[in-house]
Amino acid sequence: MDIKSRKKFFVTDFYKEMKNYKNLQYDSRKVEKGDVFVAMVGETVDGHDYIDKAIKNGATGIIISKEIEKREGIKYYLIENIRENIGEIASEFYCYPQKKLKVIGITGTNGKTTTTYILESLLGEKNVARIGTVEYKIGDEIIEAPNTTPEPIDIVKMCKKSVEKGLKYLVMEVSSHGLILGRVNMLEFDVAIFTNLTPDHLDFHKNMEEYYEAKKILFLKTKKNGVKIINTDDIYGKRYFEEFGGKSYGMKDADLVGVFKSENPSEIEINSKKIVTKLMGRYNLYNIMAGVSAGMGLGLNFEELIEKITLIEGVPGRFQMVDCKQEFAAVVDFAHTGDAMENILKTVVEMNFKKIITVFGCGGDRDVKKRSEMAKIAERYSDIVILTTDNPRTENIEKILEDSIKGFETKKYIVKKEREDGIGTAVKLAEKGDIILVLGKGHETYQIVGKTKYHFDDREILCREILKKNKNN
């Protein structure tokens, strides 16, 4: 059945009957009486295996993508490629709530999360729904974020809830996975932002060109009168700009030009306008310019946007200071790529601490090539490097550590298999005037070992180890 036929099939069947149902659900555990269960097929889970559970919980309609044994009293709707089409189906079911919002999508390797928080501040927290890596925030409601870019049904439902709460904007991170897997197929973006592209997720995309093509989808999903905002200091950004045009930002030859003046206090200039900001580092100048460019693209005044930048406090897990009354500085950051790590470390070097102690690990079941590169960068800018675990997932921890160690050229590193031990060792070694950087997990409050999530928060561990050291001293 081709796409045209499938659409016709749904118009005559499901679309005419959808008023008989309460909600769409792809998680059988959330199904209630009168709902439609969507049997999605994922990488490890097949929703068709949970149809009986969904029916038991009250589902009266089932959307399937393959022939199954049917039960009396239940309506079944067959469509191939559910994942590709479910966003459009959900939009029809919930009356296209996304069309009542200004939708801003941010893609790139680094800077997406910080840019969403900046935009939330610039557009007004009371006006913005925010979707991204740290959390989903719809008005005063916080929802745990299992994926950077949620499943299509969840996005449409959050749009509906945003409209009901009177919100005006949806600001969301759009990951390459989300683009390739069709999670935003039903959206048209009013503003599309590209931050940068550096090696990451190459276990999924195979090479940088494939990664580039994945990110490109965001611009193809932008409205004809929408605004494309591109970092043209990035080599891939230049390619996007040449193909799509739009508004550029960068440190030279751009519509919005930034100048980094000093680190502590953090002083910058944007189009010759001087700003003192609490967002530290050259890399945050790019995030700020992305946010200001988007605000201008939505019709906000440049001077007012700049004034708001001075009031932004920071982002959870992004250069987040941990203060437990210690004599040294301690910072937690989500940096988990070589480029992000280098940005953080360059910032810290300019702050003139006595010693830089860096704790990091590499994720399991992810791109192997970046492990040695991250070790090389940590060693280049740090006085002491403590190599430990991140989220090992199902991969052998010893293998991850071995891959990382290949990047070291000196012996100024320490290996601690347990992340808690790694953080504790850093605290023991830290002295007055030093800084500890704990990189890789940032805002995360868990560690994934095997297929199980355990509670683990770098900030909690740091504070506990610092208090222990203070007590012993």
Image: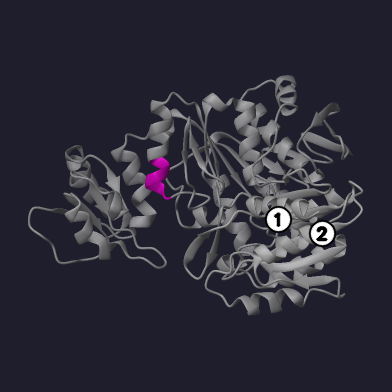
Q: Are marks 2 and 1 in contact (CB under 8 Å)?
A: no
Q: Is residue 22 above or below residue 179?
A: above
**Residue named by callout 2:** 357
Is residue 9 rendered to the left or right of residue 465? left
Is residue 372 rendered to the left or right of residue 201? right
Residue closer to the observer: 352 or 276: 352
Is residue 383 rendered to the left or right of residue 198? right
Measured as percent of width and height from the top left, residue 82 is found at: 33, 56
Q: Which corner quadrant of the image does residue 98 belong to?
A: top left
- Amino acid type, label 1: Glu
Measured as percent of width and height from the top left, residue 428 is found at: 79, 60
- The circle on residue 465 is 1
Q: Which residues are magenta?
A: 151-156
Viewer can see residue 32? yes
- Amino acid type, label 2: Ile
Query: Is 152 inside the magenta-drawn segment?
Result: yes
Residue under the image location 75 percent in, 42 percent down: 284
Q: Around disc 1, counting alpha carbons within 10 Å, would you say few (fewer than 14), some (14 to 19), or many (20 or more)?
A: many
